[in-house]
Amino acid sequence: MRITVPLALGCALMLASGASAAEKLTLPSAVSMALQNSPMVLQAQAQQEQAAAGRREAGAMRLPHLQVREIALRTDSPADAFGLQLMQERFNFPAFTTSDPNNPEPLNNYATEFEAAWPIFTGGRVMAGIGQADRMAQAATAVSDHTREAIALATASAYTDAVLARRAVELATRARDTTAKHVDQAQAFFDAGMMVESDLLQARVQLSRMEEKLISVENGARLARAGLFRVMGIDQNADYELDAQVAAIEPATSALPDALTAARARRNDVKAVAAQVDAARLGVNRARGEYLPEVVLMGKYALNADNPFGDDGDSFTVMAMARWNLWNWGQTRARVSGARSGHVAAQQAQRAHDQQVEFEVRQAWLQVREAEARLGVARGGVAQAEKALSILESRFEQGVARITDLLDAETMLDDARVRELNAGFDLQRASRTFDFAVGLPPVPEVSR
């Protein structure tokens, strides 16, 4: 079968356009998609909305409540029948005197009642409950913001890992190609009788090892991409082209004490824990309010008739009710004790969280310093390893160096380049982690 030139060119253009069809995914785009799709972010948002609804519900407790009821009743009770006739305004005294009051005819009554109740004083329970709901709403908002920051950091770390894995493939390919070139040279020397077979075999073994390493890092790159898409909450088979020149951020330069102070003032999870402690304190006030009396103002307007929603008779009632629970077998005391214990537990949880925050800031600060130092050392190591390999390549070409020495120099250079690559990406990852630890946006590119 023959393929004409125009058809071949058309196929080539189609393949080229298909290969370039992969959409480029930048780090800010990846973070934005993760914030829209991440289950953790959506869960935190739902909990924030739930807490906001609880605050609205608690705020409504201090306002009058209105109820409407329709009550249907049929009775031949003498007292009820007499009273219902009065409420329907259908009572007839002559008919009453000629009838048997002790054996009345069954009577139907439909009562339409509008009732309002207004808590005038509740011992501070309502206001404490409102305060509790408000603090929990604040905590939920802070947790939601902290979750968004955590997902942004996780996405940035996964993106960095995916780019790093791709760069590792490039380094492994470059090292494999260098080794292959040296194997070809060794084969030429062997064919010319200038090298023993054992040295040639060692060179081939080195090439096999580099081939195995390339296979491994290619698989790692595929897994790193899938890990990124998992964090973003999208299909792990998605076809995106990552930005190999992902923007770098400047490493943190603040002193450790200043970083600790900033973290306590800015971090959203610290604010959330503080709000939860305050809510627990208000819970104690709410429970103690049961020791005090309660005053409620009530009003009712009623329509009574022998047919549904009729208005044959109407009446109103206004009353104020005060009640004081003097004895309930220790239930109030137990609730107050439980609320106090809950407050103590919240305080201790806050103390533990503060210690965890301090450790996270200290760890992130030290990791930035470590990565900076490692990067400087690794860069010097690469320069030295490149120079050593260049010298050995020249000596090998002149026949005054063994292939084993050249292979050792290749291995040292490959390791040095990998260390430099890892140190550079570790510095970026540590810098973003440090920003997150002190309450700054870990991906400021999204905030701009």
Image (cartoon, grey):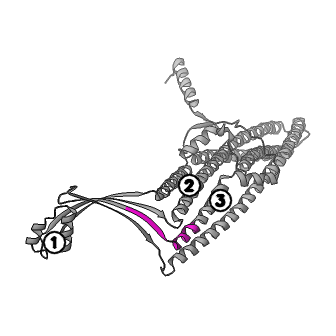
Q: Residue at 49% across / 71% down in the picture? A: 293
Q: What separation in Å lies between label 2 and label 3 (alpha carbons)?
A: 12 Å
Q: Residue at 51% across / 20% down in the picture? A: 7
Relative to residue 127, is residue 377 depicted above or below? above
Q: Nearer the viewer, residue 168 or 395?
A: 168
**Mark number for residue 179?**
none
Q: What separation in Å lies between label 3 and label 1 (alpha carbons)?
A: 63 Å
Please give the residue where the numbered disc 3 appears in the rendered image.
Answer: 274
Residue type pointed to by label 1 = Asp
Q: Quadrant of residue 197?
A: top right
Residue 343 visible here? yes
> Any magenta on residue 292?
yes
Please give the residue where the numbered disc 2 appears in the rendered image.
Answer: 137
Select label 3 or label 1 by which is in front.
Answer: 1
**Mark number for residue 76?**
1
Mark 2 is surrounded, within 10 Å at the Cα level, by few (under 14), some (14 to 19) or many (20 or more) other residues, namely: many
Q: Residue at 45% across / 62% down in the picture? A: 119
Q: Nearer the viewer, residue 157 or 282?
A: 282
Residue type pointed to by label 2 = Ala
Give the residues in magenta. Answer: 283-298
Q: Residue at 20% across / 66% down in the picture? A: 84
Relative to residue 121, is residue 205 depicted above or below? above
Quadrant housing the C terminus: top right
